[in-house]
Amino acid sequence: MLFRIDPSSTVPLYEQVAASVRRALSERRIAPGDRLPPARELATSLDVNVHTVLRAYATLRDEGVIDLRRRRGAVVTGHADGHARLATLVGELVAESRRVGMDAEELVTIVRRKFS
């Protein structure tokens, strides 16, 4: 299945849905031109509110990962493949830092050191 969520996770559900799409794109399980499921259908299959899926799709649209059109649905553009991969990795990094009790400032400090 393309979409997986963990209701017990501290990561918001819409971010988990968006991360699933980013991951699938980076792993080449979906490609530009592929259609994502309609929001209502996906919400039903994941047992979440349709607005959760719409928020995930809006986030992906803003990142350039998908194109949203009425009557056409969500279509993968693939224009932000590198960005999508980085967003997925950052999401995983943030989740791991929360798991070990690290706050945002500590994480940013570590990242800044890596850039030096």
Image (cartoon, helix red, strand yellow):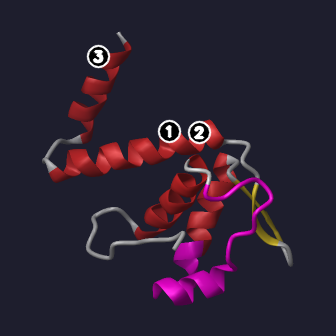
| Picture quadrant where residue 111 is located | top left
Q: Which of these two is toward me, 3 or 53? A: 3
Q: Which residues are magenta?
A: 29-53
Q: Which of these two is toward me, 4 or 18? A: 4
> Label 2 amino acid?
His
CB within 8 Å, label 3 to label 1: no
Q: In the rendered view, does 74 fall on the left or right side of 51?
A: right
Q: Which mark is residue 114?
A: none
For the point 46% across and 48% down, the residue is: 88
Q: CA distance from mark 2 to mark 1?
A: 5 Å
Q: Which of these two is toward me, 63 or 79? A: 79
How far across and how far down the image is residue 1, in percent?
51, 74
In the structure shown, which secondary structural element does the residue marked by tag 2 occupy? helix
For the point 80% across and 59% down, the residue is: 33
CB within 8 Å, label 2 to label 1: yes
For the point 67% across and 42% down, the residue is: 80
In the structure shown, which secondary structural element does the residue marked by tag 1 occupy? helix
How far across and how far down the image is residue 103, in percent?
20, 42
Answer whether residue 58 is magenta in the image: no
> Label 1 amino acid?
Leu
> Label 3 amino acid?
Arg
Answer whether residue 52 is magenta in the image: yes
Q: CA distance from mark 3 to mark 2?
A: 21 Å
Q: Residue furthest right?
A: 71
Query: Disc 2 designates what residue?
Result: 83
Q: Which mark is residue 86?
A: 1
In this rendering, which labeled residue sits more in front, label 3 or label 2? 2
Query: Disc 3 designates what residue?
Result: 113
Q: CA distance from mark 3 to mark 1?
A: 18 Å
For the point 32% across and 18% down, the residue is: 114
In the structure shown, which secondary structural element does the residue marked by tag 3 occupy? helix
